Image: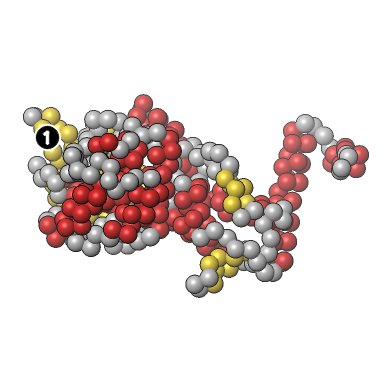
């Protein structure tokens, strides 16, 4: 499905995976990359559901999940906002980085590279 | 969760042919349920039985805990795939009639959708584009603020923008207080994300009923599920 931009988040939903998990993952990614800042207003459940063409229950469930992880906060009568605390965002950033390294290790192992060879490659790689 | 609609072993034949064959399912409060299946699978007949427009030959239908009656009609809005009461009327005449026919009809809700779809009140219903006409009839349903919204093939024959507008209106209605939605469609493409549950009909029988997210995880997508089950 086509990408949909809202409040600093670019949603790309794929009909082959549960939508609720994708919404959670994509909000997490936007927070971790800083595309979505602290204390920012999230779209309402209704707005996001209409934009993404998904059931409001799906968005509600994703928001509840993100609230439990401390990434979103809902204030009665005011709406849903991203957290004002950097710690949960830092935790997500680390989790995502850890996952990316795990993926890299998997690929290197498949390619038959040792830990040392991989470390050398990482040291030699151009970060810019 | 409260059951708003319950069908037990419902069957219906036309001229000796079984169109609906022993179907049981429930529509719970807060759920949007998609009734998928090819043309001729019995979807329209099943929906008409569910809302009480035609009687089943066998089995039992319960709407809000009772037999469908004039009392339950107040809380159910049904959008048929053809045969609307608005034929030959102008938009404003149809709105006036709807206001008299339906208790609790809220012209404000209808007006919003009409403005959004750029439908003028003076236009005749049969002069509207297909997309506008579909949105107009949906507006009449939504303005009744029903507890249960039943839609029969609401996207059939519509262009992509009208389909998207219809999907948005239905999502808005769910977010805005319509308690449950039961919608038939033979085209899953626009509605991958819309349903909480999906029922698949085949040759008048129920061949599958499950949570949409579960089916998506199991088959890859609703589209894929549809193809696999129909082929199998």
- At horizontal 74% and vertical 33% (from top left) the residue drawn is A110
Q: Is residue B171 left or right of residue A117?
A: left
| A109 on left or right of B16 | right
Query: Does the rendering let one see residue B26?
Result: no
Q: Position of residue B109 (x, y in %)?
A: 33, 57
Residue at horizontal 33 percent and vertical 32 percent from the top: B157
Where does the C terminus of chain B fall, quadrant-wise? top left
Camera sees residue A96: yes
Question: Toward the viewer: B156 or A1?
Answer: B156
Return the x and y of residue A120 as percentages of the image width and height: 90, 40
Q: Quadrant of residue B155?
A: top left
In the picture, which quadrant includes the N terminus of chain B?
bottom left
Q: Which residue is mark 1?
A: B13
Element carrying mark 1: strand
In the picture as drawn, the residue positioned furthest to the top comes out as B231
Percent coordinates x, y for residue B182 in the rendering: 29, 48
Residue B151: % across, % down: 28, 45
């Amino acid at each position: 499905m086509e990408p949909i931009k809202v409040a600093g988040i670019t949603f790309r939903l794929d009909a082959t995976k549960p939508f609720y998990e994708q919404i959670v993952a994509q909000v997490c990614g936007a927070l971790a990359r800083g595309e979505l800042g602290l204390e920012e207003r999230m779209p309402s459940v209704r707005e996001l559901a209409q934009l993404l063409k998904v059931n409001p229950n799906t968005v509600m469930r994703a928001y509840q999940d993100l609230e439990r992880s401390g990434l979103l906060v809902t204030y009665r009568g005011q709406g849903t906002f991203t957290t004002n605390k950097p710690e949960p965002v830092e935790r997500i950033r680390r989790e995502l980085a850890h996952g990316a390294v795990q993926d890299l290790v998997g690929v290197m192992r498949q390619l038959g590279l040792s830990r040392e060879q991989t470390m050398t490659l990482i040291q030699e790689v151009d970060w810019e | 969760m409260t059951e708003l609609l319950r069908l037990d072993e419902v069957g219906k034949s036309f001229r000796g042919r079984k169109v609906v064959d022993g179907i049981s399912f429930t529509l719970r409060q807060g759920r949007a349920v998609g009734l998928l299946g090819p043309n001729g699978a019995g979807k329209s007949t099943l929906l008409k039985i569910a809302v009480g427009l035609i009687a089943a030959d066998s089995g039992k239908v319960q709407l809000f805990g009772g037999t469908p009656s004039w009392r339950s009609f107040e809380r159910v809005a049904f959008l048929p795939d053809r045969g609307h009461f608005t034929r030959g009327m102008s938009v404003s005449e149809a709105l006036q009639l709807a206001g008299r026919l339906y208790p609790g009809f809220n012209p404000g809700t209808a007006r919003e959708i009409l403005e959004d779809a750029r439908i003028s009140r003076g236009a005749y219903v049969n002069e509207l584009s297909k997309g506008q006409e579909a949105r107009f009839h949906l507006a009449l349903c939504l303005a009744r603020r029903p507890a249960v919204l039943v839609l029969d093939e609401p996207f059939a024959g519509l262009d992509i923008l009208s389909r998207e507008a219809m999907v948005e209106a239905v999502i808005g209605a769910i977010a805005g207080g319509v308690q449950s939605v039961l919608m038939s469609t033979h085209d899953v493409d626009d509605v991958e994300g819309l349903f909480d549950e999906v029922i698949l009909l085949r040759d008048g029988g129920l061949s599958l009923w499950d949570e949409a997210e579960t089916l998506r995880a199991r088959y890859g997508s609703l589209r894929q599920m549809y193809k696999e089950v129909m082929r199998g």
